[in-house]
Amino acid sequence: MNSSDMKSVVGKPLNRVDGHAKVTGAARYSAEFPVAKLVHGVTIQSTIASGKIAQIDTRAAERVPGVLLVMTHLNAPKVSGEAGGDRKLPLLQDNQVRYSGQHIGVVVADTFEHAMQAAALVNIRYDEEQPALHLKEHLDQAYVPQGKIPRDQPPDSAHGSVEQGLATAAVKVEQTYTTPIENHNPMEPHATTAVWQGDRLLLYDATQGVFGAKKKVAAVLGMPPENVRIMSYFVGGGFGCKGSTWAHVVLTAMAARQVNRPVKLVLGRMQMFGPVGFRPETMQQVSLGATREGNLTALRHAGTSITSTFDEFIEPVAKTARMIYACPHIETSHRLVRLNVGTPTYMRAPGEASGSFALESAMDELAYALKIDPIELRLRNYAEFDPDKKLPWSSKSLRECYQQGAARFGWQKRNPTPRSMRDGNTLIGWGMATATYPTNRSPASAIAQIKADGTAVVRSGSQDIGTGTYTVMTQIAADALGLPAEQIQFELGDTNLPETPVSGGSQTAASVGSAVHLAGTEARSKLLQLALMDQASPLYGATAEDVIAQNGRFLLKNKAANAETYGAILSRHGLKTIEARADAKPGEEKDKYSMHSFGAQFVEVRVNPDSGEVRVSRWVGAFGVGRLLNAKTANSQLIGGIVYGIGMALMEHTVMDPNRGRVVNADLAEYHVPVNADVPSIDVIFVDEQDPHVNPIGVKGIGEIGITGSAAAIANAVYHATGQRVRDLPLTLDKLL
Ligand code: MOS
């Protein structure tokens, strides 16, 4: 039995099913749930980066009208900030200050204004210590991480001997590249509303992972997980910073229990620079060796990134170097330096985004050293299988990406000589880079229910972080159930629904989509079996293979007059609904294949030779990402990733005061992200790619690959325009003068 392919909803550029709710304001974000007797929380943050709280005077704050609680390390309940989950949380358990901006108190009052006023009146005296704030000053303390990099890989890898490979090289590039701290800045700030119902806790939380939040909060508070429920219907962007549960979430729950009232706590924009993660500063050494003909003989990528003094986050910058090019000698390593900063975290393509800046810049430098076209250099080192895992690719369309991207961009008209292309006084540069991101998948469950009125409800915990999860899951369910998309209601964002993974690592479509597909298919099969065995049905006696499902009806392939609606079958059996649950998980395909998306970025920049101003004027990105679920939302994801890359390349830079470690540009006026005027029309090509191995729905995930290679493509274009190689992001105009 198949849904007729002609009618397939998957792939169509369907408008967002939640679009109307969003533009009319009906969509409820986590800070917008009406809760009776709600009071307001505000956190107090440290103003030093290292030391101890010597004295904390809350008397003036407590006298502000409406104040219900001033919670500090002196009166906070005992909890375990180290329990569960992937982040250690400072939760007012001691007087230690570990970074500037650490939450050191929570004020709860009847209004937000009273809470703010009281927070400002808390008087704190510190015993300040000299903070460690600069990566370059502490490189001698770099250490081998205790943890693993993603996919449970060790921090170091070695195939062959890079020293040997470099010794035989005709041409070498050995350079250091640096990237700064960057902050995610989703439009919606972090927000939590905590409601206690006896010993049960309900949290409305802005999170990329409702189940992760449930487990973390339960572990920290010492509660059975089944007593914690997290709801998150709409998330206004995350990009990684809402992928972990941070201190303010638990502090809100603690405060709500203390005051015996529901508490809402929303972080201000400035409070999002420190306590909720950031992309860590990195220093990366890349060594490449090649023959005259451009065959790589050695590839080393050694990354050092910063972490906090109390927790470990590894930015896996060298991960891509393990698999992207064929080379007999490949070594990679990751080191960490502890500083008095908050703990860094995943930020859109963690590892690949910063790592590809270094590696793909170095490849461009090698292309110039060899006088080989940069696409040709990459083709000469094309990896026909994964050189690290020694596994075949589940699918790989990178050649097609280079070819189709170059054709659309007009790459063959490029004069490779730097400063050779001009428009009047303006220098024109064309650059390119390879993009890649792994295809991740985790166990996920879903329930599909067909109702007697011919509609269906499909439920799966998950969350929609603005990517279009509601929409693409509706499309998958429509095809699986044989129903029009309008007849399907898809519900998510609640830990009372079937369990799903964090929406991170570009894995939601592959993980949740597989579960929705299987649950929908199973529910439809169960319903069909009822009809096939029922003498009253016009389908009686047929086999499943004889039947097509279409528009809420089953009909015989060879005799369309023999048809019956879903509703008729259910009614005749006296059933209100029929449902199926699927618990989908990755199988042995991950041991048989290496699974990645690939792409090629092409960019034109225009550089003012007098001011050094760089404008991005044209962009073509070509990607092989498996099957597209929705042509419109997919295009948006890739455009969004590339825009994030433009910000990374040219603007984004979190600046700390060099002595006190306080972020001095902690708002959107001073922390620059691209605006529409900074973004050219972006031409995204999806290379046709069928991947039968990767998962039941053939999708590879598209949330992150767009940023990979972007910053390098821009830096390479700027070199082509100016002859100046900038190895330090962001590529601001002062670095070109
Ligand atoms: Mo993403 S940085 O895996 O949320």
Image (cartoon, grey):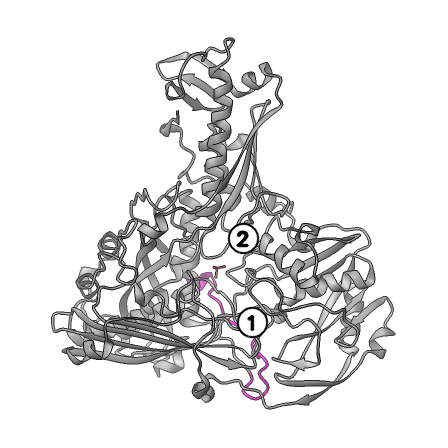
Image quadrant in which you'd find residue 120? bottom right
Q: Amino acid at mark 2?
A: Ile
| Tag nearer the camera, 2 or 1 | 2
Give the residue type that dot 1 points to.
Ala
Residue 204's x, y, as percent? Answer: 67, 53
Residue 404 in percent (x, y) is at 24, 52
Disc 1, SS:
loop
Disc 2 CB within 8 Å of nearest ligand 1 atom: yes
The answer to whether residue 425 shows anywhere in this view is no
Quadrant in the picture for the N terminus: top left
Circles 2 and 1: CB atoms closer than 8 Å: no
Residue at 53% across / 82% down in the picture?
339
How far apart are the alpha carbons under marks 2 and 1?
24 Å
Quadrant housing the C terminus: bottom left
> Which residues lie in the magenta part?
657-679
Residue 269 occupies quadrant: bottom right
Q: Residue 427 at what x, y percent from top left?
A: 28, 73
Foreground residue among 532 and 60: 532
